[in-house]
Amino acid sequence: SPDVAVQLDYYMSLQFAGVACALVNDTYQSKGINSLHFLPTCPVGEEAARVRSFQNANPSTLATLGSVEQNIFTPTLYNDPSLNVTAVASMFRRSPLCVASLGPLKDGDVIGAHEDTVELLQRIFPKQKVVASPRGTKNTDLLD
C-alpha cells in the first residue's frame, strides 16, 4: 500500500499546480512520504466515498486524502455520515476562482460555473445568466 493516497476532484490541471510542483521537486519524499498514489478521477459527488473506500480496502495506507468543493462535501457527509471523513482545510471566501474578482456585473452578464454550483450562483446573481461549464470543457469554455 502507498504511504498516502490522493483523490483529486478534477483532472490534474492548473488548479493542482502546488501538488504537481511538489511531485516534480520531490517535496513529498523529502517530508517522508515515499509512496504517493493518485486515485482515478471520479464523478462529482463521489470523492468522499472513493476516499473512504480506498482507505478501508488499504488499511496500511497512512492517509487517504481528497479534494472536493465545499458545496459537495457538506451535503454528501450529511446524507451519509458513515463515510466518516473530515474536512481539514477549505478556501471559504479565499478562492482564486471567486466571482467577486470579476468586478461590477451588468444585468444579463453571463457567469460560467461548475455544474454543481449553477443553482446557488443563480440565486446570488438573479440579474445575470449563470451557465454550467462541465468538467471536460471548462478550460476551453474560458476562451470563449
Image (tube, rainbow, N blue to C red):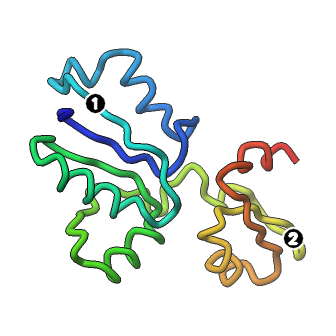
Locate residue 85: give its quadrant. Answer: bottom left
Q: Which mark is residue 106?
A: 2
Identify the residue at the far left of this view.
Answer: 60
Q: Which amino acid type corresponds to the residue marked 1 in the rendered image?
A: Leu
At 23% across and 20% down in the image, what residue appears?
29
Which is nearer the N-term, disc 1 or disc 2? 1
Q: Which mark is residue 36?
A: 1
For the residues marked 1 and 2, what is the alpha-carbon distance in whole angstroms?
46 Å
Q: In the image, residue 16 lies at what x, y percent?
A: 49, 37
Task: Determine the secondary structure under disc 2.
Answer: loop
Locate residue 2: give its quadrant. Answer: top left
At 66% across and 75% down in the image, what residue appears?
121
Disc 1 versus disc 2: nearer the observer: 1
Q: Which amino acid type corresponds to the residue marked 2 in the rendered image?
A: Lys
Instruction: Using the image as rendered, state which of residue 95 and residue 112 is in the foreground.
Output: 112
98 lies above or below 38: below
Instruction: Using the image as rendered, state which of residue 5 and residue 14 is in the foreground.
Output: 5
Task: Determine the secondary structure under disc 1.
Answer: strand
**Crowdedness near tag 1: few (<14), some (14–19) or many (≥20) residues, C-alpha within 10 Å:** some
Q: In the image, residue 139 lies at what x, y percent?
A: 72, 43
